[in-house]
Image: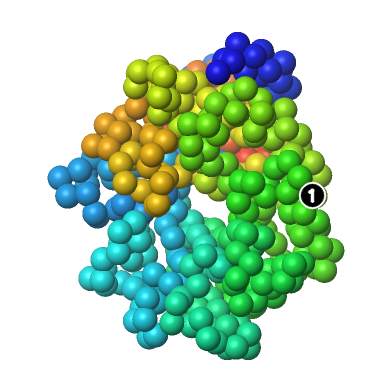
Amino acid sequence: MNLTKYRETFASLRPQIDADIEAYRKADATIRVVGGDGKAVPGAKIKLRQDTHEFNFGCNCVKLGSLGVDNERYEMALARLFNLVTTTFCLSVIEPNPGEWRFAEGSKEIFRRPPPDRVVKFAHKYGLRLKGQPLLAGSWFPEWAKDFSQDEVRALYTDYFRRVAERYGSTFDIFDIVNEAFLHTKFPLYTEDCTYVDWAFEEAAKLFPAHTVMELNEATDINYGKGAQRYFNLVSRILEKGIRLDSVGFQFHQFTENAGRKHINGEYLALEEIYQTYRRFNELGVPLYITEVTVPSNYTALSRAEGEAIQAEVVDTLYRLWFSIPNMTGINYWNLSDGVNWLREGDCLGCLTDENVYEKPAYHALYQLLNREWKTKALLESDDGGQASLRGFKGGYTGTVTVDNREVPFAFDLRDGCEPVTVVV
């Protein structure tokens, strides 16, 4: 692997990446300190701390409740690092048999497919946002519906969308409406131009509330290289039709050692290529989202420690790149813990913790970014007009204003166009 070249490539992109993080991930605020009479209070000490991110940093939680003695460690590893968790809504495992719905706790256990009610309870316990993925995926079409006509398939999914919208529309922030549209050519509604995607979003828009982000999610090999044009054309067509599409998702999986080596060598998912891909999609004016991330740490010629160090460096590099894209709204790492995952996903040891849910260097690298480097703390003092200026990362802040040994707490959300925050002391 040519890590030297990889680092040099990133170094060449770094000035623009850092400038765009400063420009697009931060916002300005004015803190006004006044007395009870409304007059400005100069010289007030203002202490600020960012508690939450506007940006979504997520991970799937599909092993929730299935790890026995490691369950608590699994939950805490998620809650310490992320502000969003995602779970699967694949129809074939939510309704494994006709009329057998697995929404509620106590439903039949299926590996890596917790009932959504369990996920909701966990998210509410730790104050995490929720994402569901995917509602329609050709790879998860129920076997019991394989002989359905196209009209029956449409009716099946319309009913499913309705059930999910009614049960979870007020609790889940984002849903992937369609997943990997181009890959599953045997799906009953598939055509070469994938017009079933248009239909699915039109149907979902009738059922989900306006605040629910409806996302299109696509596989790694379609998102980049030659496939990217096809995906770009699909998104453009949906938007030109005026169909509601709130977010465009990009998977980024390296499920093998070979894929990881090729990325580092610039032969597959090269940094320059993916960077230009996002910037091109950014021109469509639609929010973007990195929906699924896997970065391997298992390299046969290297020790486990060496492989994990490389994984941590690559994760740090990619998150900086993704965080810099103007319309990017979130990044979801995929599997949290090594060990058995879907099919061969676990072989590359591409998770943030080991199989016993002990944190790997990549976990620590993300913690450094998300909870230290990309969170703002500030000590300010009001000027003669009773004002102080802040530029910080967007999100929720708490603070105190101290005047004459009296502390007054306050809180606000820092976002684009933030109104002045007035604190009365």
* Amino acid type, label 1: Gln
Asked if 417 appears above or below 115 in the picture, the reply is above
For label 1, the SS is helix
**Considering the image in quadrants, where does the N terminus appear?**
top right
Comparing 360 with 189, the one in front is 189
In the image, taking residue 13 as reference, residue 160 lies left or right, namely left
Asked if 304 appears above or below 331 in the picture, the reply is above
In the image, taking residue 333 as reference, residue 192 lies left or right, namely right
Comparing 179 with 125, the one in front is 179
How many other residues sit within 10 Å of disc 1, few (<14), some (14-19) or many (≥20)? Answer: some
The residue positioned farthest toward the front in the image shown: 301
Labels in figure, total: 1
The residue sitting at 81% across, 44% down in the picture is 283
Picture quadrant where residue 21 is located: top right
In the image, taking residue 411 as reference, residue 212 lies left or right, namely right
Picture quadrant where residue 317 is located: top right
Circle 1 residue: 229
The residue sitting at 55% across, 87% down in the picture is 148
Q: Is residue 423 visible?
A: no
The residue positioned farthest toward the right in the image shown: 240
Comparing 56 with 352, the one in front is 352
Image spot of residue 400 (x, y percent): 44, 29
